[in-house]
Amino acid sequence: MANYDYDLFVIGAGSGGVRAARTAAATGVKVAVAEDRYLGGTCVNVGCVPKKLYSYAAHFHDAFEDSSGFGWTIPQAPKFDWATLRDNKVEEIKRLNGIYNRLLEGAGVTLINGRAKVVDAHAVEVNGERITAEKILVAVGGWPWTPQFEGSEYTVNSNQVFDLDDFPKRFLVLGGGYIAVEFASIFNGLGADTHLVYRGALFLRGFDHEVREFTRDEMAKKGVNLHFEANIERIRKVEGGLEVTLTNGEQLEVDAVLAATGRRPHLEGLGLDSLGVELNTDGTLKVNERYESSVPSILALGDVTGGPELTPVALAEAMHLVQHHYGDKTPGPLDYQNIATAVFCHPNIGTVGLSEEEARERFGAVRIYSADFRPMKHTLSGSDERCLMKLVVDDASDRVVGAHMVGDEAGETIQGIAIAVRAQLTKTDFDATVGIHPTAAEEFVTMRSLTRR
C-alpha cells in the first residue's frame, strides 16, 4: 500500500464533511479537513440555524397581536431592533463554530484553514502545500446563484441577507423556492413591506398542490404582496432606494432585493474538471451508492451531489459513506423515500412522503383525507389564520403514503408522523390511535370522513 499523508482528506467542514471526518476518525483512520470559510457550513452559518432564529423573531409580531383577545395589553407598541437580532445571531453562530471545532479536535481530526484544490486522484493542494490521501471526500456544498439582468449587482443573496447593515423597510424577494418563501414571511413578520416575485404561476414547485395554494392564501392574508408570472426586468438605484421594474410593467421602490433563485454546487477552482470527474446534467457530482465519483478515490456527499439539500440527509450520507469505506459490514443503499421536511414560512409547512399528485401517478386509486380549520387559539385571538392537515392513502394497501400540514409548528408535528409513514402504517393504524386533546395534531388521527378519492 502506498504511503499517504492521510487515509481520508475531507474538503469542506459543513454538516456532511464534519460528520464523515469524525465518524471515520473513530474507526481509527487518519483524517484531515480543509475549510476556507466557517465551520458548520451553510446550515449553521447562513442556512437552517440563523433562518430559524429569524423566523422565531418574526413570529412575535403575531404573538403581540394575538395577545389582546386573551386579556393582555401592551402599554406601548412593540418596537423591533434589527441590530439586536443580527448581532445576537452572530454570537450564537460563533458559539456553534466553536463546538464544531472541539468536535473535530476531540475526534483527532486535523483541521486545515484554506481552500483545497484536488491535483490528482490522491493529492490536494492547500495554501501552496501538497498533501496526499488514499481517499478525498468532496463535501463543499452549494452556493447561491443569481441570474444576470440590468442592475442584478444591487441584489443580495441568501448568504448576505442575514447581515444587512440596516433593516429594509421595503423588501423584495425574487424566487419561488422554500428559501424565497421563508424570507418573504420573515421580513413581513419583522415589519417590512414585503413583495415576492416569481416567474411561475405558483411558488413551491414539487410540494403538494393544495399545500401550495393554501400557503399562498395564508401568506397573502398576512400581508405579503405576491407577484406571480413576473420576473425582474431591471433594477436601478434611485435616491430613495432601488427602483425595480417587473416584466409585467409594474414598478416598485424597495430598500433591498433578495435573489433567492437557486443554489449551485460550489465546485469552482476545485480542480475536479482537470481529472475529468463525471457530472450529472445539472452540474452536480455523479456518485454511486458508495459515494464514489467516476474517479473511485474521490468521494462526494451532501448538496454537491444533487440529492435533497437537507442537513439530516448529508449527515445520513456521511454515516453511510463511512460504513461503506471503513466499516466492518456493508450497508444497503440509503433510503431517500419518506424524508420529512419543513418550510419555515408563516404559517409553517411540514410534509412527509408523497404529494397527492405523486400518489395519483404511482397508485391505481388513492383516498384523500383533509381538514382545513381555524385553530383553537384563534377563537380568542381574533386572527383569521387557518390550518391545513392532509393524509394521502394508497387505497389498495390502506397505507398512509403522504402527510402534509400548514400551520403553527408544522415541523414539530410532522416529525412524529414521519415515523409512522416510514414504518408504512395504515390509515386504520392512524384511526386506532387515540388523539391528544385539545391539540391541532390530534386532527391527524381523527380524520374519518373521506375528502375525495
Image: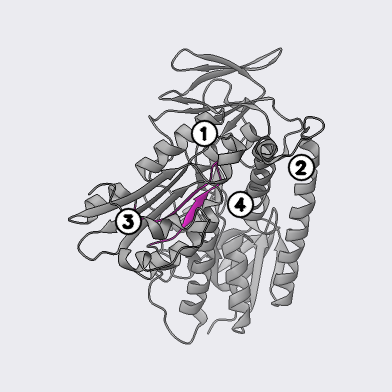
Left or right? Give the position of 197 relative to 35: left
Query: Along the polypeptide, which appears first: circle 2 or circle 1?
Result: 2
Query: Along the polypeptide, which appears first: circle 4 or circle 1?
Result: 4
Measure the C-alpha gap from mark 3 to mark 4. Answer: 36 Å
Pick whichever, 3 or 421, lies toward us: 421
Instruction: Kindly report which numbered mark, 4 or 1, lies closer to the viewer in this rendering.
Output: 1
Q: Quick check: can you spot residue 4?
A: no
Can you tell which quarter of the image residue 373 is in? top left
Query: Along the polypeptide, which appears first: circle 3 or circle 4?
Result: 4
Callout 2 secondary element: helix
Callout 4 secondary element: helix
Query: Along the polypeptide, which appears first: circle 4 or circle 2?
Result: 4
Q: Give the range drawn in magenta.
A: 338-354
Measure the C-alpha gap from mark 4 to mark 1. Answer: 20 Å
Query: Along the polypeptide, which appears first: circle 1 or circle 3?
Result: 1
Residue, disc 3? 448
Determine the residue positioned at 42% across, 57% down. 444
